[in-house]
Image (cartoon, coloured by chain):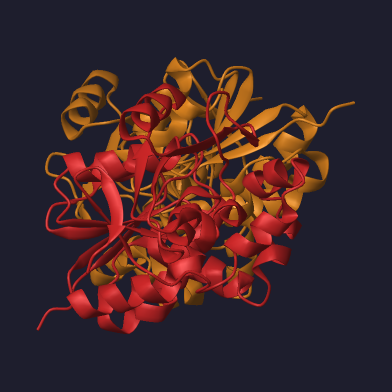
Chain colours: A orange, B red
Amino acid sequence: MKKPSIHTVLSPALLHLYDVSNTIVVVIDVLRATSTIATALYNGAKEVIPVDSVERCIQLGRELQCITAGERDGQVADGLQYGNSSFEYPEEFISGKTLVLTTTNGTKLLHMALSRGAQEIVTGSFLNLSAVCDHLLDKKKDVILGCAAWKDKPNMEDTLLAGAVISRIKHAFEINCDASHMAENLYNLSKPDLFEFMKQNDASHYHRLMNFGLERDIRHCLTEDLANILPDFENGKLFIRK
Amino acid sequence: MKKPSIHTVLSPALLHLYDVSNTIVVVIDVLRATSTIATALYNGAKEVIPVDSVERCIQLGRELQCITAGERDGQVADGLQYGNSSFEYPEEFISGKTLVLTTTNGTKLLHMALSRGAQEIVTGSFLNLSAVCDHLLDKKKDVILGCAAWKDKPNMEDTLLAGAVISRIKHAFEINCDASHMAENLYNLSKPDLFEFMKQNDASHYHRLMNFGLERDIRHCLTEDLANILPDFENGKLFIRK
């Protein structure tokens, strides 16, 4: 039997080149949207609603009477209540609640994957790496690893996560995709110390967040399986499928 | 004084994200357009005219009474005289002549760079790596390393060449570009044996050309400085500036 395929899409601006229909799309936005999403759901949030603007976040927060969150330039955005740090969403705070989260790169890619006919959309981060891999191995469907990137420019951390997924599941998949091989090689290089690798390469997002004093956040987001659940995207919401 | 910048563009479909004006754009299409261009000019060709279709190639060949070349699926295209192999262009054949070469990915990127206002456009390959690096070090201008890729999908060999350039000239440049760091890391990994690295990673273009029996061509195109000149692109033609 032919193995299912894996393709890595290094930027949302390249997604149109790939056949998304009948695939599982893993949306990856390691610093920090998909890490925050994994954490909130792991800690018991009922659901996370990703939206693409602060205005929409405020509006939805008012309509649903729920928590609003999002940052611009490393600060909680004006009019919102919380930021993008996993540490803001402990169980005692988030359990049972709905979180409306504004992210630019990640939300855009979620909606693009939907409109291009993905069969299933999940989100991936180092925090839920095993859950994502187990799901993909279980489903045996074609996979698109979609990096949210930074304003459409490929970034290091999302590429590394794609590589981490590939290195774990490639035995069960056919890979005819140079971007996937590139991602896997980079991940293998960085594996001994992801944080150090980001630092040595002065990865742009690393640099940006370090300037905001967010080293603890970066280290957290680069740690495997701290929030090991699978966020599924359906009807505009992310939740853990029962 | 502020150092000039380097950015790596992994696909023509991402070029619009970068400010190309006032930069030197290095167009990279290792397998095999920019390798063939370097070889033909090194061996004394008067000029190489890159065109994007077989039809245009035939038409221009007739008008200018010159050599026409180009392949589709690893074979000389119908109506053209020669292929994309460096070995077809020894000095005794090509010296003093004009070559019209049809390439899809490379030609497209050359014209995109031009229309976006690049100050200078040159072509790069492993065969003329040192000439490219020396030029960039000499000019001290902002640089865009533009990978021609394969139908807009990032590919291994063009990324490796970008990395090779970066590893040689980075001391004189500012690099705030994750794609550049990715390319340099991949190049450093592959440096001990580029051919073996392409093989181990089953790079898509490696695979395609090996299926056409072109191992000798691939090995040639991955060898440094065998045709160490600088092709400059102006008025639709590539030539060595005197």
Specify the quadrant of the image occupied by residue A231. top right
Q: Residue furthest left?
A: B1
Q: Is residue B26 left or right of residue B225?
A: left
Give the percent coordinates (x, y) of residue B120: 19, 57
On the image, which quarter does residue B167 sit in? bottom left
Q: Locate residue B108: give its quadrant.
A: top left
Horizontally, residue A211 falls left or right of residue A31, namely: left
The percent coordinates of residue B186 (x first, y second) are 55, 66
Report the side of B241 relative to A138 (left or right): left
| Image position, residue A242 (x, y; %) | 66, 25
Furthest toward the right, the residue is A1
Q: Report the residue at 64% width, 32% height from top.
A: A143
B135, A193: nearer the viewer: B135
- Residue in the picture at 21% in, 24% down: A62
The one nearer the camera, B116 or A102, is: B116
Q: Residue at x 67, y 62 (%)?
A: B219
Task: Give above or below for A56 relative to B67.
Answer: above
The one of B134 and A14 positioned closer to us in this rendering? B134
From this view, report whether residue B193 is shown above or below residue B180: below
